[in-house]
Amino acid sequence: MAAKILYDNIKAEVEPFSAENYLVVSTGPLTGSGAPMSSRFNISTISPLTGLIASSNCGGSFGLALKKVGYDALIITGKAREPLWIELNEDQVIFHEADALWGKTTNGRATS
C-alpha cells in the first residue's frame, strides 16, 4: 500500500528531505484481527541514501493503535516550522508543540 501511495503521489526527482516527500505509516490487512504477528506497521518514504523507496517494518502496539482509531495508513506531507507530535483519534488529527521533547533520547533523558 505504501509503495503505491508513494508511486502515485510523488515525482521521481523528489528530494528526500524536501517538503514534497511523503512519510507513509501503514498497517497490514490483518492488523487488529488477532492473527499472530499482525500488530506490525511500516514506515516508508524516499531514502536519502539511495533515492529509492525505503521501508522499515516495526512491531509493538502502534500498528494496532493506528488501526483502532480507524486508519489503515497515515500520510505525512509538508514540513513543520517547529517540532511537533501528532495525536490521532476517530474524528480529528491534532498537532501539538514538541519543544519540551526536542533533544531527548528514547529513555527521556536530555542529550548533551
Image (cartoon, helix red, strand yellow):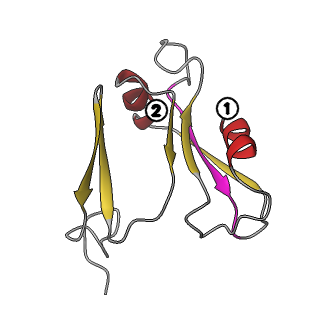
Q: Give the side of residue 81 with respect to residue 37, left or right.
A: left
**Earlier residue among tags 1 and 2:** 1
Location of residue 79 with respect to 43 vertically, above or below: below
> Quick one: 10 or 89, which is closer to the camera?
10
Residue 9, image x and y in percent? Answer: 68, 46
Q: To which quarter of the image does residue 104 belong?
A: bottom left
Residue 26, image x and y in percent? Answer: 55, 36
Going 59% across and 26% down the picture, which residue do you hit? 28
Looking at numbered disc 2 in the image, what kind of residue is underneath it? Gly
Location of residue 102 with respect to 54 vertically, above or below: below
The span picked out in magenta is 39-48
- Residue bearing the label numbered 1: 1
Going 31% across and 61% down the picture, which residue do you hit? 84
Residue 38, image x and y in percent? Answer: 55, 23
Residue 79, image x and y in percent? Answer: 46, 65
Q: Residues within 10 Å of mark 1 (few under 14, many from 20)?
A: some
> Quick one: 77 or 27, which is closer to the camera?
77
Q: Give the side of residue 102 with respect to residue 62, left or right.
A: left
Q: Residue furthest bottom?
A: 112
Looking at numbered disc 1 in the image, what kind of residue is underneath it? Met
Q: CA distance from mark 1 to mark 2?
A: 14 Å
For the residues bearing labels 1 and 2, Cβ distance under 8 angstroms: no
